[in-house]
């Protein structure tokens, strides 16, 4: 891909407004083309706040405008439907976790991406954070000796996810600051820099 990339967001809820969209619109090569979510009042607010050219409650209307890349951050049960529609419309997709609720649907998305020669990425990039890379290297270098057992814990800010519509007005919190780094990394990959989750020729 060369030049500006026309981007859309399907499911512009709290998480997308707090994490995905601010990083998306901060990139010089991205044009915020379209946004979709239910609720016209909040949809209009998201459109105006982030400078999207177009907004609609129906995601198909957004896809009809032929964006080049799309974030799917809708409710989990809709990820399959929305990601499949975007891929079949010829759009590269970054899908928020979980990819789908049914593993068979997830594998079907992979097959669609391959058949359509589109990128399909899942927003699961914590392992790419600089301090995780540094820790991995230190362990590989023997900093703690022979590794016999490891237990990992993932901690997320769930209270805000379940209780508010933050993300449009508040300052960037520490979580969002370091999440912005890996969102940028994901977008570079979606734009064609580096590896992708699923890509093949028809």
Image (cartoon, rainbow, N blue to C red):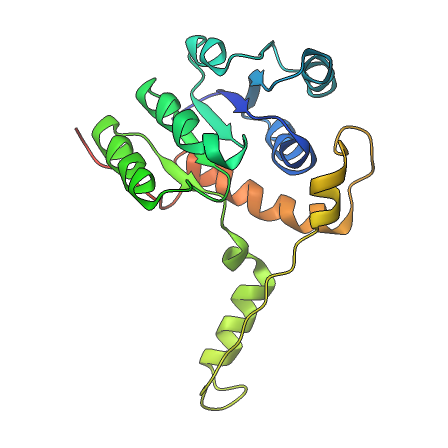
- Residue appearing at x 50%, y 59% in the figure: 127
Residue extending furthest left?
Answer: 202
Which quadrant: the N terminus?
A: top left
Depth order, front residue of 28/139 = 139
- Residue appearing at x 29%, y 38% in the figure: 110
Residue 130 place in picture, x, y as percent: 58, 60
Please count the marks in the image. Answer: 0
Quadrant in which residue 156 is drawn:
bottom right
Is 76 on the left or on the right of 119, as rendered?
right
Depth order, front residue of 144/72 = 72
Quick check: 153 above or below 124?
below
Residue 200 place in picture, x, y as percent: 22, 36
Which quadrant: the C terminus?
A: top left
- Residue appearing at x 50%, y 79% in the figure: 150
- Residue appearing at x 52%, y 65% in the figure: 133
Residue 3 place in picture, x, y as percent: 46, 21
Residue 48 place in picture, x, y as percent: 72, 14
Quick check: 49 above or below 128?
above
């Amino acid at each position: 891909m060369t030049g500006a990339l026309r981007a859309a967001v399907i499911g512009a809820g709290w998480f997308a407004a707090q994490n995905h969209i601010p990083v998306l619109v901060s990139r010089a090569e991205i044009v915020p083309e379209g946004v979709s979510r239910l609720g016209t009042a909040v949809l209009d607010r998201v459109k105006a706040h982030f400078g999207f050219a177009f907004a609609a409650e129906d995601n198909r209307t957004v896809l009809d405008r032929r964006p080049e890349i799309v974030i799917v951050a809708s409710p989990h049960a809709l990820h399959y439907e929305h990601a499949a529609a975007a891929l079949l419309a010829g759009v590269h997709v970054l899908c928020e976790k979980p990819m789908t609720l049914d593993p068979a649907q997830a594998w079907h998305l992979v097959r669609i991406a391959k058949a359509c020669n589109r990128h399909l990425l899942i927003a699961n990039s914590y392992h790419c954070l600089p301090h995780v890379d540094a820790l991995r290297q230190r362990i590989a270098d023997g900093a703690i000796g022979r590794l016999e057992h490891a237990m990992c814990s993932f901690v997320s800010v769930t209270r805000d996810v379940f209780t508010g519509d933050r993300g449009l007005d508040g300052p960037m919190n520490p979580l969002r600051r370091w999440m912005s780094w890996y969102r940028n990394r994901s977008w570079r990959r979606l734009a064609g820099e580096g590896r992708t989750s699923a890509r093949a020729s028809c």
